Image (spheres, helix red, strand yellow):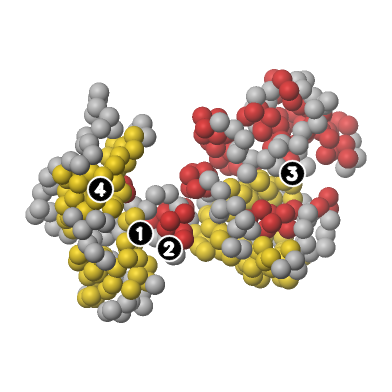
Amino acid sequence: MALLEIRDVVKRFGDFTAVNHVSLSVEAGEFFTLLGPSGCGKTTLLRMLAGFEEPDEGQLLLDGQPLNGVPPEKRPVHTVFQSYALFPHMTVEHNVAFPLKMAKVPAEQIKARVAEVLEDVRLTQFARRFPHELSGGQRQRVAIARALVNRPRVLLLDEPLSALDAKLREQMQLELINLQKEVGITFIYVTHDQGEALALSHRIAVMSQGKVEQLDAPENIYSYPKSRFVADFIGQCNLLDATITEIAADRMKVEIAGVGIAEVLPVAGAAVGQQGTLTLRPEKIKLGATLPADVPDEIHFKGKVHDCLYLGDVTVYIVELENGTRIETMLPNAAPGRARFFDDNDQVELAWRFDAGHFLLA
């Protein structure tokens, strides 16, 4: 049995349906992420798990026991908010001890458990400091320590890193991964940041308009999106409209609108004449002034550089094919002293393997 089950849950606010018949399960010890754009329903779902909202329909179960109607303070679930919500007049150790005092835990137990959890988040030396004396990352760890001190079955995290700068966010991502492994508590994490979700999660539920579009491991969501929305939302992706022209056992031929014939991996339920979308990640596409034409299983097209974007570790190139279609690709900036390989209007060639993309049926 899964630790947490969400069964056909619906939440409405007036005429607006924020969560629309969502069903999913979360395993014990899992780092599970709810990912999607603003307004997709992920935070509403988290608030229902925390007890701050009640479902209009459906069931929430933890260890097989219903959560519906159970007040937040009686659920073995704690929430870490984006704002941290620390008490400014209390020291770190007093902030962390607060939930235990409210639960009337004996003083000697409080001291031991606070010391244990501060060691887990590497804040022992900051125990007597106040929140204003800490960095953003340290305050975040205090908030996590306070949520963990009661040993909840599930820790809910609502965009906890969004207020941090890029470098600190990366450090905190690594700390969260390590902390989750150490404490073994189930994390349910809400974010709109695709890179963060891919880096942190065992599994991701991608949400849109109150529904789960895809629930899978990060590598499957990235490489094998199940919908055009997921392909477009997760990272950068070329979306090429195409029609199936031929189907064989190990591959299909598709005609990409305005581009030409390409080969792709077959998909279940496909039929000749059926329309769909070829999803092709930029890093799967080769780019060069000239490319060998005799490489097996590769598709080649010619074009010119329309634009480029320098991102430090890579440069993204927008290549306009001879018919005007634009395809995004990228090259790593690995050569010493050189940041750009091509300039606007340079003639180039593109190539990708038949199995580089993923075909979505319309």
Nearest to N terminus: mark 3 or mark 1: 3
Residue drawn 64% across and 28% down?
A: 136
Q: Is residue 203 above or below residue 134?
A: below
Image coordinates of residue 264 in percent, x first then y, are: 26, 65
Q: Which residue is mark 3?
A: 151
Q: Which residue is mark 1?
A: 239
Three-letter amino acid code at disc 2? Arg
Image coordinates of residue 157 in percent, x first then y, are: 66, 45
Quadrant in the picture for residue 48: bottom right
Image coordinates of residue 175 in percent, x first then y, are: 57, 34
Instruction: Tell me whether the residue at label 1 lies in contact with that at label 2, contact meaning CB atoms closer than 8 angstroms.
Output: yes
Q: Nearer the viewer, mark 3 or mark 2?
A: 2
Q: Nearer the viewer, residue 356 or 83?
A: 83
Nearest to N terminus: mark 3 or mark 4: 3
Q: Which residue is mark 4?
A: 319
- Callout 3: SS: loop
Q: Is residue 66 above or below residue 287?
A: below
- Callout 1: SS: strand
Three-letter amino acid code at disc 4? Val
Nearest to N terminus: mark 1 or mark 2: 2
Q: Is residue 170 visible?
A: yes
- Callout 4: SS: strand
Kindly report the distance in space between the C-alpha atoms of the residues bearing marks 3 and 2.
40 Å
Q: Is residue 171 visible?
A: no
Nearest to N terminus: mark 1 or mark 4: 1
In-image side of 313 versus 344 (left or right): right
* Local crowd size for mark 1, using a 10 Å CA cut-off: few (<14), some (14–19), many (≥20): many
